[in-house]
Amino acid sequence: MMSRENGRELETELDHIRQSVQDILTTPIGTRIMRREYGSLIYQLIDSPFDEIATLQLYAATATALLRWEDRIILNSVSLVTNEEGSYFLDMDCSLVDSNKQASLSIPLSIGSTL
C-alpha cells in the first residue's frame, strides 16, 4: 500500500482506504481508459446551484460510488462541511467490513480552480 503523493508506504489500512475513497470520489466517470465506469458523478454537480438538491445529489453520488467501488467499508453517514478558507470536505462515518470497527474519514473536495 503506497502513498500516491510521495511513494512511501502507507501506515495503516485506514490510510489506504482514505486514499482509495478520495480517488473514487474525485475521478469523473468515463475518464479511466480501461475502467470507463470507475469513479463518481460528483463532477456533474460542478455548475449546479449550491442548494439542498445539489447537496442531496452529492450524498447520493458519494454513496453510490463507494457502494460499487470500495468494498472494505460500509457507509453509515455523510455530511458536507466547509472550513474558514472556504474549502469543502466530505465527512463520513463508516464501518470497516473486516473488523466491524467504526471509522471516520474526511475527504477534501478539490473541485474547480485552485490558486
Image: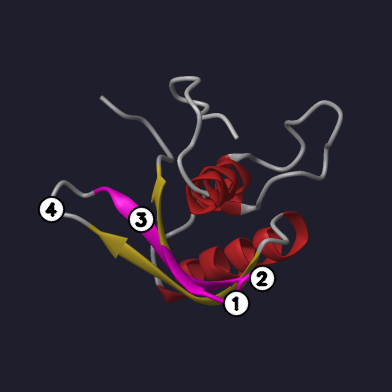
In the image, residue 22 above or below residue 99: above
Residue plotted at (66% across, 51% down): 40
Instruction: Identify residue for label 3.
Output: 89
- Amino acid, disc 1: Asn
Q: Are the two marked residues, 1 and 2, in contact with CB atoms closer than 8 angstroms?
A: yes
Q: Main secondary structure of the magenta part?
A: strand
- Amino acid, disc 2: Val
Instruction: Identify residue for label 2.
Output: 97
Q: Residue furthest top?
A: 7
Secondary structure at numbered mark 3: strand
- Which contiguous range is marked in magenta? 87-104
Label 1, label 2: how far apart the Cα atoms are: 5 Å
Q: 10 Å neighbourhood of mark 2: few (<14), some, or many (≥20)?
A: few
Position of the C terminus by quadrant: top left
Label 1, label 4: how far apart the Cα atoms are: 34 Å
Q: Are the two marked residues, 1 and 3, in contact with CB atoms closer than 8 angstroms?
A: no
Mark 1 or 4, which is nearer the eye? 1
Ranked by sequence position, the earlier of labels 4 and 2 is 4
Ranked by sequence position, the earlier of labels 1 and 4 is 4
Residue plotted at (58% across, 73% down): 75
Nearest the viewer among 38 and 21 is: 21
Label 1, label 3: how far apart the Cα atoms are: 24 Å
Instruction: Identify residue for label 4.
Output: 84
User: Is residue 99 within the magenta segment?
Assistant: yes
Ranked by sequence position, the earlier of labels 1 and 3 is 3
Instruction: Identify residue for label 1.
Output: 100
Q: Are the two marked residues, 4 and 2, in contact with CB atoms closer than 8 angstroms?
A: no
Ranked by sequence position, the earlier of labels 3 and 2 is 3
- Amino acid, disc 4: Glu
Label 4, label 3: how far apart the Cα atoms are: 12 Å
Q: Are the two marked residues, 4 and 3, in contact with CB atoms closer than 8 angstroms?
A: no
